[in-house]
Structures are given as C-alpha cells and as structure tokens.
Amino acid sequence: MPPFMEPFRIKSVEPIPFPTAGERRDALVAAGWNLFRVPAGAITIDLLTDSGTAAMSAAQWSALMRGDESYAGARSFDRFESVVRDLTGYPEVLPVHQGRAAERIVLGLLLRPGDISVSNTHFDSTRASVEAAGAQAVDLPVPIARGEPAPFGGDIDLDRLRDLLRRSADRVRCVVLTITNNAGGGQPVSVRNVKATRQLCDEHGVLLYLDASRFAENAYLVTEREEGYQGRTPREVARVVFDLADGCWASLKKDGMANIGGLIALRDAGLARRAREQLIAFEGFPTYGGLAGRDLEALAQGLLEVIEPDYLRYRAECARWFGEQLGLAGLPVLQPTGCHAVYVDAGEMLSHIPPHELPATAFGNALYLAGGVRVTELGTLVFGRRDPDGGPDVPAPRELVRFTLPRRVYTLSHLEYVVDVAETVSSKAGRLTGYRIVEQAGALRQFTAVLRPAA
Ligand SMILES: *Cc1c(COP(=O)(O)O)cnc(C)c1O
C-alpha cells in the first residue's frame, strides 16, 4: 500500500486512448521516431510535461463563469492581483499569457548588451531572453557528487557566485534563482541559500529575482528538509523566500494549477511602470495581459489551492512513491525525488548505446512501444551540441529520461501501469538499440527532429 491517497475525488472524467501495439508502432514511425511528434490521441499515459496539463478543481471551473471579460479594469484582475499580493507581498502585479512573456519583459528591461545574469540554472526560455538582450547567462548550480543524495540540489553555488561578483560585479545585473530548479532535477533551493544570495547581492548592489514557477513545491520541500522550517506552513516559507527577493516572475502553467498563464510581481514601481508599457505593446492591457478574465479567475483560485499542505504532501509523496516503484522495477532513479517529476538515468541502463545514438531517446521510445507511455528525453537529443565540423554530436553530460507528473491528473493505478511498462522495458534493456538523427533544426531540435533506428 502506498503511504498516501489522492486528496480529492473525481467529478469529471476523460477517456484515455488504448492504441494497440501495432498502432503504437505505426504512430511512432509516422512521427519520425520522435515522441514530440506523436499525436496525443495515440498516447495512453502522457508524462511529457507538467506545463499547462493540470486538472482544475470544481472551484476553478465555477470561477470561470465569474470571469469578467471587460477590456479594462476587469474585476477578475482585482481578484488575481489580491491573491498574488497576499502570497508574495509584492505590490506590483502584472498578468502575462505565459512564463516566457514575463521573462522577455523583465529581463529585456533589466539587461543591457554585455551584462551578465547569474542563476542556479536559467530555464531554457529564460536563457533565450537573457541572450536576446545581448547579455550572457551564467549558470552556477551547486555541485552534486554522483550517487550522493543532496537535499538542496537546487541551490546556487555560493563560492562561485562570490567569485564572479568579486571579479565582475560591474557586469552582473541580476541573480535569478529558479525555484525549484527544473534543470537540476526539480530540486529545491533552501531558504539558507536564498538568504546568503541576498547578502551577496546586497554587498555588490545586484538585483535578486525569482523564477517562481514552482514556488509552492519549493516551499513544501523546504518544510520537509530544512532545519528550522519543519512545522512552518508552505505559505509561510514561500513568503520568507519572496521577502528576500526584489521580485519574481512565473509560468503559471506549473504551480498556477491552470492550463495557461503567467505573472510578473515586483517591488519597484518604476520598473513596473516600464513593464506595463511593454505589456501594452506586446501582451495586452495591464489588467488582462494576454489572458481572458476567466483565466485570471482560474489562476486566482489555483494559487490558493496549490499552497495547501494536503495537496503538496500528496504531490511530494506521489513522486517519492513513484520513484521507489520505478527503482524496484530496475530503473536507476535519481534521488531524492522532488515533486514534479522522477528522473531516470537511461545512460546507465543502456550503456551499450553510445551517446550519439541517443540512449535516452531509445529508452523513451521503448516505453511508448511497450505501453503507450510518453516521457521526455533529457539527453543528447536535447543537450548534445552539433559538432561544427559535421562530426558526431558532443554528448550531453547525462542521458536522462523524465517521467513528469501533471498536477491532479493521473491516479495511483495509472502510475502502477507505468511502473509495469517500465519493468517490461527494463527487463530487455540490453537488447534495445539506438537512433540516428535524419533531420534537425538549428535550435531546440528535440521538438521537430526526424530520427531513424540505428541498427
Ligand atoms: C515552464 C518554465 C518557464 C517558461 O514558462 P512558459 O509558461 O512555458 O513560457 C520558465 N521557467 C521555468 C522554471 C519553467 O518551468
């Protein structure tokens, strides 16, 4: 028996597709052996992403009906603003259509060509906004020894940050802490790390912003793991963290518990005024920012639900249990698990497949063929760089596969099914073969690449 159950019951259901083994094979061939190109109608359990895939609550669905679709000054904005102010303490609140719009606006206003933005890890769209401003994105994740569990694997490396600030404080414009650190396995950032970062920023006159897309999951993991915060509520911890920063942005497709949305929340009224000008030019009037009034209602309610301890406990326990089960099924699972996903080291399982033949892709495709399960590859297809001389790819540091958990969507029995499928694949791992890239785009090639089996 798992040590928890879903803290909700189901009121509205959606059938899931059960393509046959033959249909799955046909779909994958037609998709150029790339799971991103497989239609959702051919997927049984979709663990591709936790972005925009949440199930809304009955309270959110009823809030939609309250949506005020006035162009200017909509009441739905007032509700959204008041929930965000309450959570963050930041007075200036701007809605945007999704996280990357927020990044483009804030980083576009803060950064000048030649500036540096430092982070525990810039999310890929964050990095793109930094580089679009002509600035440099420097990632300083805390080093994690292989096989050694790190409770705060999302932290920024304070020694390297101190060094960088000493050497080039005049070029560093901002530090961005991504909470939780998605690229780093969804691991949390400790309050102690945020406090030390704040102090370094103050010593050098540098701004501190949060990419708060998973702020609630980060806060919950702090209440579990950090000395001094056990017994505090996730809301209290989230507020301690927000208090330490100059502002935040977030993709509300994650901890907003809705299917679209984002936000900017700031202390600096001058920056907020300039951000509103950008918002009007590129997103929409400042009281809707590219969203419908009903979206703002769903988000305001979602932000109240996501910070509830019962929900967050279930979320973390679910990932932990799922990770344990996948481990028992023979998969090398990265520990500790966070909240939004379980990461598996496909390179370790498929050590007979060289990185340029995409072992993580091979593992993901095998899961789909065996049971219609879709996961994300985070290996050489995503992070490998093309050799400029036309040789094989420069391999990614690790060949990971991410089993991502949409919020409130799949029950334990769905995840048990995934574990069964994973066990089948793991039992024949030694016989799996790799892939080669036939067609690829210059950037973000994983979304569109066409592959073929290497054998
Ligand atoms: C998803 C995400 C973003 C980008 O947000 P979108 O809503 O997809 O544009 C930025 N940062 C982090 C940490 C994310 O997870």
Image (cartoon, grey):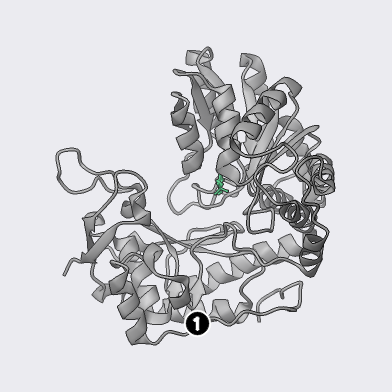
The quadrant holding residue 244 is top right
Q: Is residue 418 left or right of residue 82?
A: left
Q: Is residue 214 left or right of residue 125?
A: right
Q: Is residue 39 above or below residue 270?
A: below
| Kind of element beneath mark 1 | loop
Tell me the amino acid under the disc marked 1.
Pro
Residue nearer the viewer, 335 or 62: 62
Residue 185 in sight? yes
Residue that appears at 73% across and 45% down: 227
Q: Is residue 171 left or right of residue 212?
A: left
Residue nearer the viewer, 63 or 375: 63
Residue that appears at 47% across and 85% down: 18
The quadrant holding residue 24 is bottom left
Question: x, y percentage for residue 370?
Answer: 38, 80
Q: Is residue 296 above or below residue 406?
A: above
Question: x, y percentage for residue 45?
Answer: 51, 75
Q: Which residue is mark 1?
A: 17
Q: Is residue 331 above or below residue 414?
A: above
Q: Quadrant where the C terminus lies?
A: bottom left
